[in-house]
């Protein structure tokens, strides 16, 4: 009898401790963080205990989606803030450019104030880091790679990866980018021939395959034998994880159907990447990005200050980050660019004329030619302004930190909504929601009243390491397409930007493509 009482007492004590922990996570900590900001005049919508503001957010997005669905052929609106996250637009109008809201247990201060956003983006304080939810809630996709880590580990990762993507090295990759693109365009020529002179092509699928091929050849060399399967599974993992609510306490641990699918994909991707690594270790290798990650992993393990995860996890997480960020974002931007050029034939003709003038007599583009394609650069910059793949700059206050007279308490997550800055009519003019590449005619510095409001690649010390790679790849792909084909929007195209961790065409991009 005494033993039974002891067991019951232990169980009861454990339950009380767990209940107290849940109460502290869901009630005490959020209230404490929000009250510190409310005392400084920062307000926001009232959250529920378990879901925060998730229910309200979902309702507004569903209303927006329903309105789009009911329209048989909706007009192409580039006002992404209103389309993709109407809740942020609503709360900004109600509470001002700096407000608080929550997704489950995650407390967020949303900063749409340009000057404050600049201070945060360019801060080098050790009191700022990447949010912990990136490596937890998004762990299967991000892990603790360069996109989600902070402190010494992130510095070590950047030291390894950034030099491999410097401009001088990327210029040496142009030939293989051209080669891969030409192969894709030959498949378009076959479709056109079979279609009797034109073809209705879902270009975003081809852009993903092409970008995956390019990043494979450029960064992972000949050992990249299972690339197609890895990219396919990463894409499935991305789409699956975008359906899971971030910040709902304990959700990621429950063996529900969607979590089981995520865990299965994560395990398969992990094994496939290690197979690629195993092949590289066996035979002759190239001095490419994969090799630098392998060498960096060894240095990481040898350094006791950095050694927080296994060597295998260090390799897999950084490979996943590069696979995902290196091909998905570029492919999406190429697709948006083609959509915008198809919808604006005058700009399509103007860029094509530039490309044909520079690449005379059918010459394939090289690094020098790409540098001279100013009009094409303007189109890409305007595409990234209207449709930035990553829609938020995110940070976490690791200690109390002050920006623009506002003290952000330790544990608060900071979110800068990039589209809201890049389509602010006060900064960009009354045509901020329109496609007008001419605004970049004098470069980024002359494009708007506050150049720091243009941050498609982030800003400061955490600027995307692949920026040069992405820009040159986009120029190669678009210049070759423009030099060979004319294209217009397919009647089947349905404009519906969707946020699936990145901002992508919800129903794809379909174009009617004809040869020049």
Image (tube, rainbow, N blue to C red):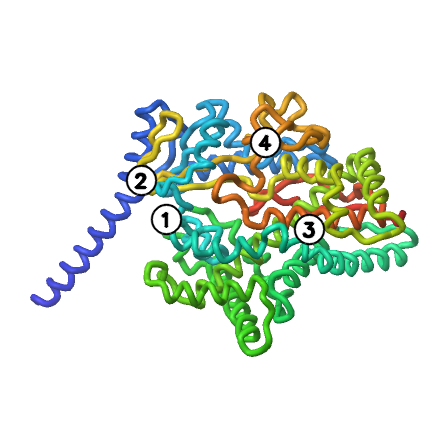
Q: Residues within 10 Å of mark 2 (few under 14, many from 20)?
A: some
Q: Element at badge 3?
A: helix
Q: Distance of mark 4 from mark 1, alpha carbons? A: 33 Å
Residue 340 visible in the picture:
yes
Looking at the image, residue 211 lies above or below residue 130: below
Placement of 348 over or under 7, stated as above or below: above
Q: Earlier in the sequence, mark 1 or mark 2?
A: 1
Q: Which numbered disc flags the more N-terminal residue, 4 or 1?
A: 1
Q: Earlier in the sequence, mark 3 or mark 4?
A: 4
Report how many numbered discs are placed on residues in the image: 4
To which residue does mark 1 refer?
A: 249
- Residue occupied by mark 3: 473
**Which mark is in front, 1 or 3?**
3
Chain-order first, disc 2 or disc 3: 2
Comparing marks 3 and 4, which lies closer to the viewer?
3
Of tags 4 and 1, the one toward the viewer is 4
Quick one: label 1 or label 3, which is nearer the N terminus? 1
Left/right of residue 18 with respect to residue 461 in the rendered view: left
Kindly identify which residue carries mark 4: 422
Secondary element under disc 2, as helix, strand or loop, is loop
Q: Which mark is residue 219?
A: none
Q: CA distance from mark 2 to mark 4?
A: 29 Å
Left or right of 355 on screen, residue 123 = left
Q: Nearer the viewer, residue 92 or 211?
A: 211
Separation (CA) of disc 2 from disc 3 = 39 Å
Alpha carbons under labels 1 and 2: distance apart: 23 Å
Q: Residue furthest left?
A: 2
- Look at the image and tell me in which quarter the N terminus lies: bottom left
Q: Dot 2 corresponds to which residue? A: 399
Q: CA distance from mark 1 to mark 3?
A: 40 Å
Return the residue nearer the eye: 223 or 55.
223
């Amino acid at each position: 009898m005494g033993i039974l009482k002891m067991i019951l007492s232990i169980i009861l004590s454990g339950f009380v401790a767990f209940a107290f922990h849940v109460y502290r996570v869901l009630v005490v900590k959020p209230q404490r963080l929000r009250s510190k900001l409310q005392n400084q005049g920062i307000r926001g919508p009232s959250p529920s205990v378990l879901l925060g503001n998730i229910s309200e957010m979902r309702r507004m997005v569903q209303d927006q989606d329903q309105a789009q669905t009911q329209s048989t052929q909706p007009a192409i609106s580039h006002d992404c803030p209103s389309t993709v996250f109407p809740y942020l637009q609503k709360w900004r109008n109600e509470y001002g450019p700096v407000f608080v809201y929550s997704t489950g247990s995650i407390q967020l201060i949303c900063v749409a104030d340009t000057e404050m956003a600049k201070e945060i983006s360019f801060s080098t304080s050790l009191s700022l880091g990447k949010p912990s939810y990136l490596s937890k809630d998004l762990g299967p996709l991000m892990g603790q790679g360069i996109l989600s880590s902070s402190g010494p580990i992130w510095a070590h990762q950047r030291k390894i990866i950034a030099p491999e993507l410097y401009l001088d090295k990327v210029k040496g990759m142009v030939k293989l980018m051209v080669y891969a693109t030409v192969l894709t365009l030959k498949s378009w020529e076959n479709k056109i021939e079979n279609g009797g002179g034109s073809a209705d092509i879902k270009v975003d699928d081809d852009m993903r395959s092409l970008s995956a091929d390019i990043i494979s050849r450029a960064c992972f060399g000949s050992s990249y034998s299972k690339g197609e399967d890895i990219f396919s599974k990463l894409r499935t993992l991305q789409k699956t994880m975008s359906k899971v609510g971030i910040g709902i306490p304990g959700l990621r641990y429950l063996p529900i159907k969607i979590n089981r699918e995520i865990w299965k994909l994560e395990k398969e991707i992990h094994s496939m990447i290690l197979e690629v690594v195993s092949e590289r270790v066996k035979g002759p290798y190239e001095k490419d990005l994969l090799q630098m990650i392998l060498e960096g992993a060894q240095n990481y393990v040898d350094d006791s200050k950095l050694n927080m995860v296994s060597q295998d996890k260090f390799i897999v997480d950084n490979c996943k980050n590069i696979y995902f960020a290196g091909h998905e974002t570029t492919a999406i931007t190429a697709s948006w660019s083609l959509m915008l050029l198809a919808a604006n034939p005058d700009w399509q003709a103007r860029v094509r004329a530039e490309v044909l003038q520079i690449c005379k007599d059918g010459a394939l583009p090289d690094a020098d030619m790409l540098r001279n394609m100013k009009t094409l650069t303007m189109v890409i910059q305007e595409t990234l302004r209207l449709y930035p793949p990553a829609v938020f700059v995110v940070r976490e206050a690791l200690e109390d930190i002050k920006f623009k007279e506002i003290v952000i308490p330790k544990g608060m997550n900071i979110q800068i909504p990039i589209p809201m800055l890049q389509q602010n009519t006060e900064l960009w003019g009354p045509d901020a929601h329109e496609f007008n590449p001419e605004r970049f005619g004098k470069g980024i510095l002359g494009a708007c009243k506050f150049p720091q409001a243009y941050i498609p690649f982030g800003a400061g010390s955490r600027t995307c390491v692949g920026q040069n790679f992405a820009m040159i790849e986009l120029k190669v792909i678009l210049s070759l397409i423009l030099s060979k084909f004319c294209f217009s929007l397919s009647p089947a195209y349905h404009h519906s930007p969707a946020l699936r961790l990145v901002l992508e065409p919800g129903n794809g991009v379909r174009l009617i493509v004809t040869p020049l």
